[in-house]
Image (cartoon, grey):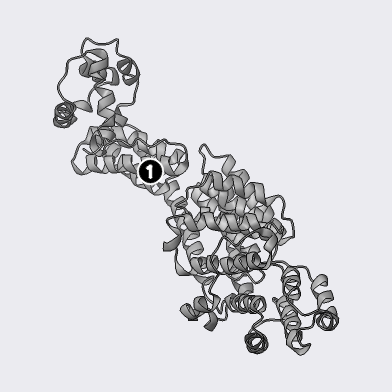
Amino acid sequence: MKDLMLFSQLYGLKSKYNHKQTSTDGLLGKMESELADLEMMTDEALATKVYGDNINASTYRSLKSRLKEKMITDLLLGSSNKSKNNIREKQEDVFREYAAVQIANLNGQAKLKELLATQLVKKSRKYHVTEVTVDTAWILYLHHLFYDTASKRSKNYFEIYEYNSELLALERACKRKYAELSQMLQNQKMDITEVSKTCLEFFEEYSTAAEQTPSFSLNRMLYLIGCVGYYLIRDYNSMYKLANEALLFLQTLPFKSLPIEAQFRRYIVRSQLLQGEYAQGIPILQEIINTSNKKNTGWFNSYQLLIQLYMLTNRYKKAVECLETVQKNKLYKSLPAIFKNDWRILEAYLNFVQLQNPELGKPTMSRFRINKFINNNPELTESKRMYNIQLIVAQLLFYFHDRNYRKIEERIDAVSKYTSRYLKKDETYRSQVFIKMLAEIPRNNYTRLAIERHTRKFRKKLSEHPSTMDIGIDNIEIIPYEKLWEMILSKMKR
């Protein structure tokens, strides 16, 4: 056994109680050899057997009231010394005990199997591990059918099996739909309206079933599908309400699930951000980050949103500090390319802001090599995703900073061609307006007054259509165009 923690506690600390006993390894071997006898003993008898006459030991008093099946499970699988603070850890225990049931079942130890399975089916239902409930209820159904024919227990366990089998089918349908949805979102040619319609129709179809059961997995997946559906059609108010509803549901459960709560809290922050409400999201994200595991994608997602909010509120120094914290995470370098590119593009914009604003102090980041980044990732510029417009704008920002007029004119020409081919007027109106503004710069010989005069009508159009920025991969405005325009104008001739 790898973990002897339980047995160290079971047999007491001999130095503290001066209780002579054989080594822990020897007793462990004895316990393993007497497993069949162990299942027949009471908790108090087991503790008495271990401690003998030393009934004053504090560990004796605590252990005699412990559940025997916990001891047997630890004997079979080794104990876990993790703190059981949330649903993930509690479900981990369920699967450990499920393995113990299977071992007993395979070894033909009927009494031991019944003892462990009876407690496990209660625990798996409490912590919403439906697949374990289904299998364990079936094992108990067969056990009582053969060994306890006069009892009604076989019928009770069959009812548990049937109900949870139907529930498991619903849970798996939602998981499958969410997986399909994730795949659809990677398709560059997806019909956003159609995908959203599919999400919301599925949500409505399964909502009735979800209302009738407190299933953690079913409700979680269903709420996520609904939030994505509203997000895609830019119904941010409905997304906000649904995310809040999900949080209320999570509070009704007999356990905590901080990563899942954080998932829906981020949807709330997104909905606020997309409706122009920035201040409330910052403390929410800071709280999420403080309670998140740095190894989880949620930690990275929370920081990405927080950086976005800092940039929107002109707190660029804070944004840079956050980015540097993320880059120090050991997992940053191994992020999948599709996520890593998001961070690299954010880095490009923040580096430009540092170069552009001496009042922020000396740049803490190395000069971002935008051309090298584009050359090393040709799939970004070949794609029809909004990565393209992000990268073109980022390139232009560095060219303006360096006053590389030849490159500026070449890139603006490329932008003009791109807009006529790919940008959709209804979804990217502000981008098209901004590109028209950029095109006026070389036409007016980089003279600020002339540029301002010829772009006044476009500035008005921007003000009439406030930014509703997307936060994900297809983020178009990392920094609002109005702010970028002021930065660019500061480099023009007076």
Circle 1 residue: 92
Q: Quadrant of residue 6?
A: top left
Q: Secondary structure at mark 1?
A: helix
Location of residue 118 with respect to 314 vertically, above or below: above
- Could you say which is closer to the camera, residue 379 or residue 422? 379
Q: Position of residue 491 (x, y in %)?
A: 73, 75
Q: Position of residue 213 (x, y in %)?
A: 54, 46
Quadrant (top left/top right/bottom left/bottom right) for the N terminus: top left
Location of residue 232 with respect to 371 vertically, above or below: above
- Could you say which is closer to the camera, residue 471 or residue 393? 393
Residue 428 in sight: yes
> What amino acid is labelled 1 in the image?
Glu
Q: Quadrant of residue 109?
A: top left
Q: Position of residue 392 (x, y in %)?
A: 61, 79
Is 59 positioned to the left or the right of 260 in the image? left
Residue 206 in sight: no
Location of residue 231 with respect to 161 vertically, above or below: below
Please give the name of the residue rendered at 17% of the width and 32% of the height, measured from the top-left corner.
32
- Could you say which is closer to the camera, residue 426 or residue 337? 337
Please give the name of the residue rendered at 33% of the width and 15% of the height, measured from the top-left corner.
58
Quadrant (top left/top right/bottom left/bottom right) for the C terminus: bottom right
- Label 1 packing within 10 angstroms: few (<14), some (14-19), many (20+): some
Q: Position of residue 66 (x, y in %)?
A: 34, 23
Q: Quadrant of residue 42?
A: top left
Is 347 positioned to the left or the right of 470 in the image? left
Q: How many marks are shown on the rendered structure? A: 1
